[in-house]
Image (spheres, rainbow, N blue to C red):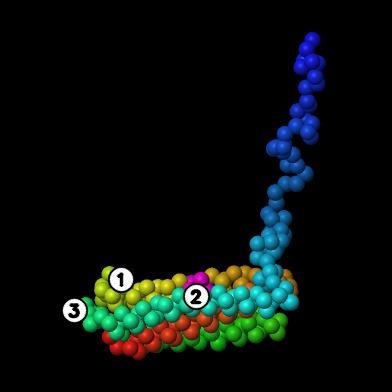
């Protein structure tokens, strides 16, 4: 008999063989139950939504410095667009194609602007409430800011639908939609961040261990509002 035939055939039940678990293992011992799934949800949220933004108090300043640098880089992008817009308007006599009216200041635009700028005060009040550990007040103010951001985006979409020019309507059309669309993307990003921070507030004692995420989102929202002030002035307060 050969050495191969004399070797022992491994037991299929041996723990050494295979890494795939027995599909029947623990079925009776640990049945899948809805109540256990619900009980594990806070731990799941804790894993994927880090505590307080994942930044300890002693590193808060360094992290906010990083956010500030990021916003400065975004400012450079916006200001390059602004300077391009100004240069094109000053150097092109055919800024508006014949028969096309540029964007006009209306009550609707004013209300939309007031809503967005007011949201800066609301989100700052929400952050201040969180720092005083008034979590319920924080949630209400945060949701209000979220709603104001949605209102602004919807208003922006309504304005676009009522304009008599499109992206391809000369220099004016291209620059208008580029500027307002790029700003709208930042508003949308801010809304997503607000939704994430609101979700974190439902993790027990989450913001007692740091609130970097809320502070960063608030700063980003102030930035978005400040950019809109400049954009509003260039587009609506400078007649074509």
Label 1: how many Cα within 10 Å (few below 14, some 14–19, many 20+)? few
* Image position of 107 (left or right of 13): left
Disc 3 to disc 1: CB gap under 8 Å:
no
Q: Which residue is mark 2?
A: 74
Tell me the distance, in whole angstroms, between the alpha carbons under discs 3 and 1.
16 Å
Q: Which residue is mark 1?
A: 167
Q: Earlier in the sequence, mark 2 or mark 3?
A: 2
Where does the image place residue 33, in percent across and percent down from the top left? 70, 51
Q: Earlier in the sequence, mark 3 or mark 1?
A: 3
Where does the image place residue 43, in percent across and percent down from the top left? 71, 61
Q: Earlier in the sequence, mark 1 or mark 2?
A: 2
Disc 1 to disc 2: CB gap under 8 Å:
no
Report the mark closest to the observer, 1 or 2: 2
Label 2: how many Cα within 10 Å (few below 14, some 14–19, many 20+)? some
Describe the element under mark 1 as helix, strand or loop: loop
At a point 40% along the width and 77% down the height, the residue shown is 81
Describe the element under mark 3 as helix, strand or loop: loop
Q: Quadrant of the C terminus?
A: bottom left
Q: Is residue 7 magenta?
A: no
Q: Which residue is mark 3?
A: 98
From where the camera sits, is residue 160 visible?
A: no
Q: Which residues are magenta?
A: 186-191
At a point 33% along the width and 81% down the height, the residue shown is 87
Describe the element under mark 2 as helix, strand or loop: helix
């Amino acid at each position: 008999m050969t050495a191969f035939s004399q070797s022992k055939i491994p037991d299929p039940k041996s723990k050494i063989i295979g890494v795939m678990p027995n599909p029947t293992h623990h079925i009776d011992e640990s049945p899948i139950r809805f109540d256990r799934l619900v009980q594990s949800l806070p731990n799941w949220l804790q894993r994927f939504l880090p505590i307080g933004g994942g930044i300890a108090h002693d590193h808060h300043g360094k992290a906010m410095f990083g956010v500030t640098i990021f916003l400065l880089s975004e400012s450079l992008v916006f200001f390059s667009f602004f300077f391009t817009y100004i240069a094109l308007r000053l150097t092109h006599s055919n800024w508006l194609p014949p028969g096309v009216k540029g964007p006009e200041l209306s009550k609707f635009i004013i209300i939309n602007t007031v809503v967005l700028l007011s949201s800066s005060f609301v989100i700052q009040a929400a952050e201040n409430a969180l720092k005083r550990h008034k979590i319920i007040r924080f949630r209400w103010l945060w949701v209000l800011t979220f709603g104001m951001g949605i209102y602004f985006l919807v208003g922006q979409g309504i304005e676009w639908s009522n304009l008599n020019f499109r992206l391809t309507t000369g220099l004016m059309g291209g620059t208008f939609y580029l500027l307002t669309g790029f700003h709208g993307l930042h508003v949308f990003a801010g809304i997503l961040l607000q939704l994430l921070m609101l979700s974190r507030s439902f993790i027990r004692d989450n913001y007692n261990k740091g609130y970097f995420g809320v502070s960063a989102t608030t700063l980003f929202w102030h930035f978005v509002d400040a950019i809109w002030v400049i954009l509003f002035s260039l587009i609506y307060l400078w007649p074509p």
